[in-house]
Image (cartoon, rainbow, N blue to C red):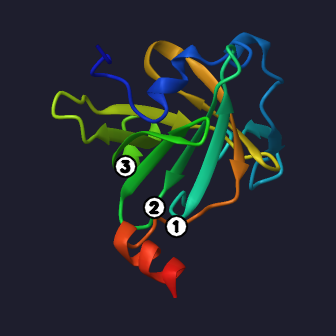
Amino acid sequence: MRPTSILILASLLVIGCAPAAEDEAPQETSETPDGSGTETASPAPPDSLSGTAWRADAEDGARFVTYLDEDGSYRDLRNGDPYQQGEWTYAEGARGKMLCFLPDDEAGIETCWEPGKREDDTMIVTGPEGRRVELTSVAYEPPAEDAEAEEEAGEQ
């Protein structure tokens, strides 16, 4: 039986984690507006995730790709095969911007992840119980309009 809390990034719990928070490089510092010293700058998450796709590789070699569609739905693939789908949101939460997933599964439970600063094509997200996962940006592919429409297009 599939656990009810499995969702796009929750499925990444089986994936190798990024280093623990204490292993991170120190936070960036910048001059204060009055020039009297430095203040700590927290890593800024991306402004938008709509129309993006992210990959994570599991320790067992499985490859998960999540597509964050502009209509608020997500599609999760495991090794190229449909794995899970549902709705996603990206909004301010108690700890800053949170990326939340609610699977279509009627027993699905919403799970939220805190995205870190995007560096080049990677980003680390922190999930339930402090679990950290490194994601890699991949080419976004919009959802197929309709399976029948694709078949008809292929026949023409």
From the viewer's perspective, is 155 left or right of 2? right
Q: CA distance from mark 2 to mark 1?
A: 7 Å
Q: Quadrant of residue 128?
A: top left
Task: Give yes or no for contact between labels 2 and 1 (Cβ–Cβ under 8 Å).
Answer: yes
What amino acid type is highlighted by mark number 3? Trp
Please name whichever residue, 122 or 145, is drawn nearer the observer in this view of the structure: 145
- Give the vertical position of 94 relative to 51 (above or below): above
Give residue 91's mark.
none
What amino acid type is highlighted by mark number 1? Pro
Q: Which residue position holds label 3? A: 88
Q: Residue at x 53, y 78 (%)?
A: 154
Q: Earlier in the sequence, mark 3 or mark 2?
A: 2
Give residue 69's mark.
2
Task: Give yes or no for contact between labels 3 and 1 (Cβ–Cβ under 8 Å).
Answer: no
Is there any visible trace of residue 47 in the rendered image?
Answer: no
- Give the vertical position of 42 relative to 72 (above or below): above
Q: Which residue position holds label 1? A: 142
Q: Earlier in the sequence, mark 3 or mark 1?
A: 3
- Dot 1: few (<14), some (14–19), or many (≥20) neighbours within 10 Å? some
Residue 25 locus on image (x, y percent): 83, 24
Q: Secondary structure at mark 3?
A: strand
Q: Secondary structure at mark 2?
A: loop
- Give the vertical position of 52 relative to 63 (above or below): below
Q: Quadrant of residue 106?
A: top left
Residue 130 locus on image (x, y percent): 52, 16
Disc nearest the viewer among 3 and 2 = 2
